[in-house]
Image (cartoon, rainbow, N blue to C red):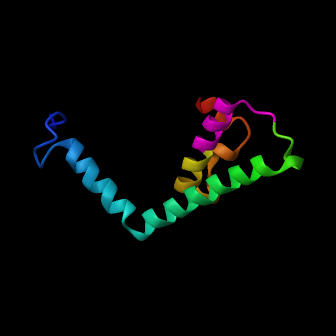
Amino acid sequence: MANIENASRDKSMLMEGIKVTKTILNSPAGSDMNYATAKTVSQFFDELDDPSANLSLGLWDWVKYGTIITVGDSMYGKGNPFRREGIASAFW
């Protein structure tokens, strides 16, 4: 069984996960994911500022939807399955 407890050792699953995450986020693919996330968040705020959008959401619903769409866009791009009707709400 893998060592998942002692994070002070070099070979723990926690430390390996941190190394892999840092490697990905510091790569061109990680930069693309971060850019996609920032773009989606910006679009959500633009929608809130648009009076013609006529949004009627509770704050928590907006946060849940924004989270799943943002993460999905950064992972799947235009093929984000959470943008299909009903998928995001089924996730929560």
Task: Between residue 84 and residue 36, name the one nearer to us.
Answer: 36
Q: Quadrant of the N terminus?
A: top left
On the image, which quarter does residue 46 sit in?
bottom right
On the image, which quarter does residue 26 sit in?
bottom left
On the image, which quarter does residue 65 sit in?
top right
Image position, residue 34 (x, y; %): 50, 60
Residue 62 is covered by the magenta coloring = yes
Image position, residue 40 (x, y; %): 63, 55
39 lies above or below 15: below
Residue drawn at (50%, 66%) of the image: 32
Q: Residue furthest left?
A: 9
Image position, residue 79 (x, y; %): 63, 55
Q: Main secondary structure of the magenta part?
A: helix
Image position, residue 69 (x, y; %): 62, 46
Residue 30 is covered by the magenta coloring = no
Residue drawn at (71%, 44%) of the image: 84
92 lies above or below 34: above
Q: Residue furthest bottom?
A: 28
Segment tinted magenta in the rendering: 56-68
Residue drawn at (43%, 63%) of the image: 30
